[in-house]
Amino acid sequence: MAGDLRYQKGLLFEAAMIHKWKTFLAACFHKRFLYDAVLPYNLFWRITGEQCQPFLRNHPIEVLDVGCRGECPPELAGLSPCISYTGLEADIDECTRLQKSRLPFARASFLPFAVSGRAGKALLRVNREPGTSSFLPVDPMFRERFGGEAYETLKTRVLRTTTLDNLAKLKHVPQPDFLKIDTQGTELQILAGGRRMLQKVSLVEIEVEFEAIYQGQSLFHHVNDFMLQAGAKLYIDRGKSKRRKIPEEERIIDWLKTQGFEVIDCGKMSVKDQAAAFAHAELIVAPHGGALTNLIFCRPGTKIIELLSSEYPNPCYRDLCCVAKLPYIGIIGNSQKPKTTSDLSDSSGPIETTLEDFKKAFEQMSLG
């Protein structure tokens, strides 16, 4: 059900964007209102969503705004009655002010969380212009070129930090459809701490710079590279199947989890959710089985590690990976009676793969 709703919301986002571009082109050729002939700050800008509001009132768009200081984001104003809004703000004074404010959303809440790339402590620099406050110090070159009175630090606070994935795991925040991050230079760290959350996000809006304002700030190309490469690491569990069991599976899964892997059972997922999971993955590890037919949904470049029994070294998914341009490694477990691909009669035997085999495959793919 959740997958179906995300799909329908995605279609509505697409329709809204098409509507805006039609308006823009019409303004260019027919001399309509000047503002319509200017490329929008955001494709949601000035979109009212009248046609989709009946659906969205029953299924609100979940918006998570990290660094929500200030007023209602103007690009969301047109859809505000259909938005369930959660704002995270590290500055407790600003968060308290926002909690007392009235915003036009269907639901709005503000939480005083300092979000970073890891849990710990960090120093917040509260500047003369509060909107420039950051966990990072101002870059001396920027101050020299442009002055920096607005960036003058007036006070500091040591705050406990957490990550987006931790907040979601503890159910402090809902899974967003739309993730907005504006935290004065720490956007990339926040993204890195929300890899699991990102897998189900439909749209991400991030403030980035091409020249550093803060020391140690990640610039556009850093964030762009991360977003292009961001993807899930999946281990495909065969669930309750009694065929092709892996004696060391528990040990292997424990190690994979330390490498950031998520374990999924395709037998418990809809076809649409399986397709989405494989489409967003950057690395998939799986024992040989029918779930790997979902490889057709993978993006070119997705890395595949398949676990095979020496008694059933079926090459069908290797061949599929070759056609789909998916880097592939097959790990064939040890057995006393190995067979060739011409004798695939016993497909139910165990896969005698060890953790050491896994680590070698990771090194071979330059993953370890």
Image: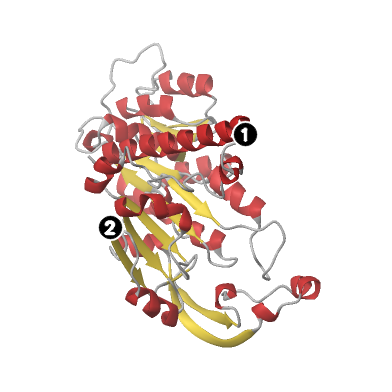
Q: Using the rendered image of the protein, determine whether residue 250 is visible from the camera's viewpoint.
A: yes
Query: Label 1 is placed on what type of residue?
Result: Cys
| Left or right, 350 with reference to 234 | left
Q: Position of residue 225 (x, y in %)?
A: 61, 47
How many residues crowd mark 2 within 10 Å: few (<14), some (14–19), many (20+)?
some
Residue drawn at point x = 21 percent, y = 46 percent? 58
Position of residue 83 measured from the top left corner of the image (x, y, whole percent):
32, 53
Which residue appears at 28% of the width and 40% of the height?
5
Kind of residue sitting beneath label 2 = Ala
Residue 367 in view (yes/no)? no
Foreground residue among 339 and 322 = 322
Label 2 or label 1, whichever lies nearer to me, is 1
Front-most of residues 300 and 218: 218
Disc 2, SS: loop
> What is the crowding at mark 1: few (fewer than 14 residues within 10 Å), some, or many (at least 20)?
some
Give the labeled residue for mark 1: 28
**Residue closest to the eye, 175 or 323:** 175
Quarter of the image for the N terminus: give it.
top left
